[in-house]
Each structure stands twice: as structure tokens, then as C-alpha cells.
Image (cartoon, rainbow, N blue to C red):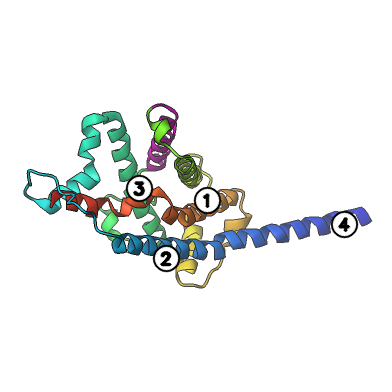
Amino acid sequence: MLLSITTHEEFSYIGGVLQTIFYIILVPMVYLAVAVFALGTLVRIIKILKGPRHPTTLQIYPEKKSKWLGALYDTFLFPTVRKHKPVLWVFLILFHAGLILLFIGHLELIWDLSLFQIIPHEPFLGKGFVGLTLTVSLLFFLFRRFSSPVRELSVPEDYYLLILLFLVVLFGSQMDWARRWYEYGELSLEDYRDYFMSLITFRPELPYNATFSGHSFMLILHVFLANLFLIFFPFSQSMHAFLSLPINKLRRG
């Protein structure tokens, strides 16, 4: 009898500790990650803008018309990559298109946006195949770094960022696949929306299924890894993503 009571108390204690850890990951760490991402990105951009001007022009001659359209074309369609590395170009296009659809899907978890319901669908778009496309694309980006000449140009940070982003996408996609492909509905769209809205309104509240359902560990891992990615991103070389359009505009004149 004493053993039974002790075991019950131990399980209750462990359960309480786990719930505390889950709450820290799903609430305070999210706010911290978003704050670090926003402030870190702003500081990096300010430092770049305050840096010494380049002694020579970056513009490419002969000068072409449609400077802004040209800059947008260079930034989002990667013509140089398409010309020299067509396979990489295909995965880049798939990856960036997937990111856009993924962003829209997260918006739809927060609000019902009729603009995106021209083709009726449940969040996320793509019936699970957007996550699959992103997962395969990230694996391609990762494995190409193990072969020359990309291997010699890579630094540990490149591998860390790709692996981290891959895991974020994988665990996030698993939640979508579980609901769509495996008919696992314990963690519903309403649970996700309640969680997101509570964060946005600064009245954090965790739905019961967010921490007690059989699939809640996927949400916790997804959010934890996403937090790490947001915290790390402003201090990585991937910050160039925010500077691609301005640099291409300078090249176009």
C-alpha cells in the first residue's frame, strides 16, 4: 500500500515538472524567441546600414530598364542559379514556394481569411504535400553540403541551421500528416487556434490537448525547435535573405 502511494506521488511530481517545462516552451520561450528575432534582426540591419559605404558602385553595366522589376526577378526567381545549377534551382523554387504556403497556413490557424479560400481547403494548403516538399528540399540542401565544392565552403553554422530548420518542418508536418493522412484527430484545428490566439492576445492559455493528448509531444518539439531557430537566425549568415532585394536593386541601378 505504501509503495502504491509513493509511486503515485512520484508520477504526480514528474507530471507536474513536465507540465511546467511544456508551459515554459509553449509560452515564455515563444515570447522570448520572437523578441530576440525581431530585435536581433533590427540591430543587424541598422549595423549594416551604418557601416562604411562600398568604395565602388555595385551596379552592373550595361544598364537595363525596369530596375525594380529586374531586382524582383533576380531576388525571387534566381536566374543565375537556373543557368548554372538547374537542379539546385528547382529545389530553391520549391522551397521558397513552400515557405510562402506554410506562412499562409499559419495565418489561417489564427484567422479565417476568405482571400485564401478561393479554392476551399482546410489549413494547411496542399493536403500535407507542402510539408513533404519542404522536407525533401531541406534534405537536398543538407546533403549537397557533404560534397565538393560546397563542402569546402561550408561552416558548422550552415549544417546547424539546416538541420534545425529540417526538424522544425518535419515535426510541424507530422502534425498535419497525422490529422490528414492517419486520421489522428486528438489535437484539432480548434486547439491550435485557441493556443495561437491566446499568445497573440497576451492571455496565454494551453488547451488540454496541447499538453495531454497522445500527439502533443509533436507540438512541443515543433515549437521548441522553432524557438531555437528564431533565436539563432538573426546571428547567422542567413540574414542575407533580408538584404537580397536591396542588393539586387543596387546591382540594377
Q: Which residue is mark 3?
A: 99
Disc 3 versus disc 4: nearer the observer: 3
Between the residue at mark 3 and the residue at mark 1, the CA separation in whole angstroms equals 17 Å
Q: CA distance from mark 3 to mark 4?
A: 49 Å
- Distance between the Cα atoms at labels 1 and 4? 35 Å
| Foreground disc of the pair 3, 2 | 2
What residue sits right under mark 1 in the picture? 225
The Cα–Cα distance between marks 2 and 1, rounded to whole angstroms, is: 19 Å
Residue type, mark 3 in image: Leu
Q: Is residue 229 left or right of residue 3?
A: left
- The amino acid type found where label 2 is placed reads Leu
Q: Which mark is drawn over residue 39? A: 2
Residue at the image point whose x is 12% and y is 52% from the top: 253
- Under circle 4, the secondary element is helix
Give the farthest residue toward the right.
Answer: 1
- Looking at the image, the residue that sits furthest to the top is 148
Kind of element beneath mark 3: helix
Relative to 92, does residue 22 appear above or below in the rendering?
A: below
The reply to whether residue 209 is in sight is no
Q: Local crowd at mark 1 within 10 Å, few (<14), some, or many (≥20)? A: many
The amino acid type of the residue labelled 4 equals Thr
Q: Say few, some or many: other residues with alpha carbon within 10 Å of mark 3 (under 14 / 14 to 19 / 20 or more).
A: some
Residue 25 in which image quadrant: bottom right
Q: In front of the other: label 3 or label 1?
A: 1
- Residue 100 in view here: yes
Task: Please name the residue that numbered disc 4 is placed on.
Answer: 6
Q: Main secondary structure of the magenta part?
A: helix
